[in-house]
Image (cartoon, rainbow, N blue to C red):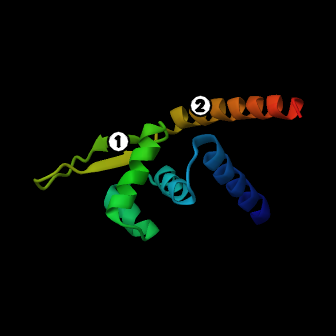
């Protein structure tokens, strides 16, 4: 059972890397957001992954631009620059990933057919 979970996790990561041109760090950040009930901010992603805040910001922008995560202003603001929380709408994400998987499979089928 554990082997099956690890294999599925591996396949999901490979799919995200190929389909969305993501790095390992991008995928790790994405999965942390997906598995977070309340979402994540730049500080928590930076801390979780052991990377700089500027690198975390770039990753979150890339994920947001790809339409994989949503960016919302944090309701808690202590003045200064607004903080943002990144989260996912799981039903919408499932639909988006399913469509992308179908596109990738179709593209691969066409490539294999031409070999």
Front residue of this view, candidates 62 and 73? 62
Image position, residue 15 (x, y; %): 67, 46
Q: Name the residue tied to disc 2.
A: 95
* Mark drawn on residue 12: none
* Identity of the residue drawn at 46% across and 45% down: 63
For disc 1, the neighbor class at 10 Å (few under 14, some 14 to 19, many from 20) is some
Q: Name the residue tied to disc 1.
A: 71
Instruction: State whether residue 61 is above or below residue 95.
Output: below
Image position, residue 88 (x, y; %): 46, 42
Separation of marks 1 and 2 at Cα, in angstroms? 19 Å
Looking at this view, name the residue that lies furthest to the front.
Answer: 115
The answer to whether residue 78 is seen in the rendering is: yes
In this rendering, the count of numbered labels is 2
For disc 2, the neighbor class at 10 Å (few under 14, some 14 to 19, many from 20) is few
Image quarter (top left, top right, bottom left or bottom right) of the C terminus? top right
The answer to whether residue 87 is seen in the rendering is: no
Secondary structure at numbered mark 2: helix
Drawn side of residue 14 relative to residue 68, left or right: right
Drawn side of residue 12 relative to residue 22, left or right: right
When asked about the image quadrant of residue 1, the answer is bottom right
* Identity of the residue drawn at 78% across and 35% down: 108
């Amino acid at each position: 059972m554990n082997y099956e979970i690890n294999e599925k996790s591996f396949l999901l990561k490979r799919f995200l890397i190929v389909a969305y041109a993501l790095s390992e760090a991008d995928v790790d950040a994405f999965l942390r957001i997906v598995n977070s009930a309340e979402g994540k901010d730049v500080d928590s992603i930076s801390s979780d992954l052991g990377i700089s805040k500027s690198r975390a910001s770039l990753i979150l922008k890339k994920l947001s631009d790809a339409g994989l995560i949503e960016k919302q202003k944090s309701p808690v603001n202590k003045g200064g620059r607004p903080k943002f929380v990144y989260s996912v709408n799981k039903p919408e994400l499932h639909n988006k990933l399913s469509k992308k998987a179908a596109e990738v499979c179709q593209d691969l089928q066409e490539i294999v057919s031409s070999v």
